Image (spheres, grey):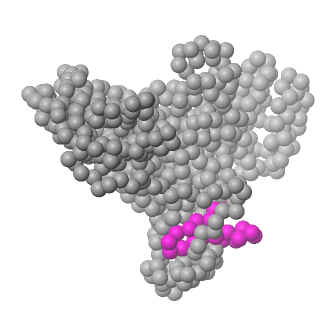
Amino acid sequence: MKQYSFYLYSAKQNQLLTLVGTEAFVNSLLEELSALISYGSSQMGYICVSPAVKDNLVKFSDKWSKDCPKVKALLSYISKLNDGEYIYVVDAGFPDLNRQLVLVWIRETAKGHDASKAMDAFLRYHGPLKTKYDYYSFGFDGIKHYEGEPDKSKRECRFCHGVAKENPQSSALQSEGRSIVRFGDKNNAHAISDAIGNKLLFCLEECVDCNSNLSKVERDFIYLMDWRRAINGIRNKDGKLPNVFGKEAALRTDSNGVQTLYVNKDYLRDFSGNLIRFRLNNKKVMTDQGAYRAICKYAINLMPSSYLPHFQQTIDWIAGRMSATTLPVVMTAYNLPHIDQPVLDLFFRRSDDNSLPLCTAMLYVCDMCYLYVLPFADTDKACVMHLNGLNAYWQPFCQLLSSAIWKPEDMSDFDISTPWIEVSLPLIDGLRVKIVSGDDEHLRQPVSDKPNTKPREKDTEQDFPKFDSACARYTNTEVLISKIVNTDPIPSDALHHATNKMGIYIELDLPNVTASVVVNLSIYDPTGHIEYLNFAFSSHFDMIKMERYIEVNDEYLAIDYHLRDYLFYTACNMAAPVFKERIRNTQYAICSLEKALCIDKRVLSSIDYIIRTKSRMLKISDIVLHPVPYDV
């Protein structure tokens, strides 16, 4: 059996059609399309609908419907169009740029304009860039797209590498350490969050567990877009307009679907005529880096699987298996024409110039566009991590929206913040705006009326006596590993922006009243692929009254974070001179333990504790004991 896939575009509807039949059927189909097309070929050309066209398709359908029952879908599509309307046929194997050109032709022809001029103008702006890269576009034509392996038995999750139980080799793969995972139905994993309007794009290679766990990653970007999606009328997965609450305003939707924005009069920035200007903050919190991870996840979900091996570290970063302190700048354009369905464009570099990013993405959502690179590709050099807003690299991409005002944004910050937007709204037409006092009930967020909803418990820390550093007496530091792994010359910028991977343990021996801090540090190039050096050490302490700062019983475990900080930073300070001596007279002499271990506060959250009591040994992570107000 043979199949042929092609797109049908018209002013009324767009559709992807895949017809399967004998080789004779497919050959006859191509001949029939060629005969019907007024201009072009069976692979890309337009048909002018007429009674003769419909009659020919009726005869063709009657002849081949037993061989391919789905051929009736082609007849059904054309029968809905009026005589004189146009259909453009495009081979599904053609580049996405061709399909975008067709949509330009359809739009301009329907308006009665000269479509050829519009297509020429489109190519002038888009052609040079989109033909320079391997270019893919998703969501632009209203057609559902399912990225990934359609056969569930052959799927591998893009994020955990688990395989389906339907895989014939699942038992053997499981014995090799691969997870056996479950994949939902084809609409289970939205490739872009459905909360921001995505109804068309799905990833077949994201397992149910990863889809659930990584929804927390997407949440940061959803919260960032809350006000924009609400004001622009973007409905959530339940088809409802979201309610958004901030300190100075609340946007509510009543039972009839009517939106009203209630604004606290004390926060108005400007009030002139029928126009008000103010800042809208969201009560929900997020991190900039979390939002960056989310939009990179969208790209991973939709990229062709052949590129995935280059982005394994990107996937680890998205999934929280590695941290980043510095990321490439993201370019943003605001106040664009509003769209309901997000569109994602992916540009993959064809050249061998590894000083340029392997993948650049443009995400169009609500009234914005995000232009960004996917960090940590295994082909990219160090300089890719530090593209800035003035870099000439961005300019050809920004020209795709030549009238937009682009601004660079640093989205490396992992501290929690409140997303906000500046808005100017008219008091007439469209969105209803009401100016109210600060105690107005509409500004208060209602308590959820969902059944079984429990009040959120406030995170609390165990109360300990005031910390006294005299409780820990430093004794000595042992060097466990000191190894220069890479001796090849490296550029200086690669060292300034190196990637650190580490394992940190604090061992607390209660019976012997001692403590040890064990650190294993590996320094890599900025992309995290080339290991430069490995240094591991263990610092030891004699403890006095250690029980004052540790609480251990059958139901409860708590460790004073002051004790953690003192042990860890003292250990680093004592090991620092030893580390410096080991790398003196090498190209790594500018490296320091302080920069690698003591600047990024997320390092503390990566510590694991080993607690020895008289009867047992316990192991627990710091993030479990000490919840933190930032993205780890």
Residue lying at 52% horizontally and 69% vertically, measured from the top left: 246
Whole-percent x, y for residue 347 in the image: 46, 38
Q: Is residue 134 visible?
A: yes
Q: Is residue 525 visible?
A: no
Q: Quarter-wise, where is residue 21 in the image?
A: top right
Whole-percent x, y for residue 112 in the image: 67, 57
Residue lying at 70% horizontally and 58% vertically, measured from the top left: 450
116 lies above or below 573: below
Q: Quadrant of the C terminus?
A: top left
**Residue 467 appears left or right of 321:** left
Residue 258 is inside the magenta segment: yes
Whole-percent x, y for residue 586 in the image: 12, 27
Q: Quarter-wise, where is residue 31 in the image?
A: top right
**Residue 224 appears left or right of 603:** right
* Depth order, front residue of 54/134: 134
* Tally of numbered tags: 0
* Depth order, front residue of 309/263: 263
Please report the bounds of the magenta region as a residue range: 241-259
Which residue extends farthest bottom?
Answer: 273
Residue 245 is inside the magenta segment: yes
Whole-percent x, y for residue 393 in the image: 34, 44
**Residue 360 appears left or right of 105:** left
Residue lying at 42% horizontally and 59% vertically, measured from the top left: 417
Q: Quadrant of the N terminus?
A: top right
Residue lying at 54% horizontally and 51% vertically, measured from the top left: 219
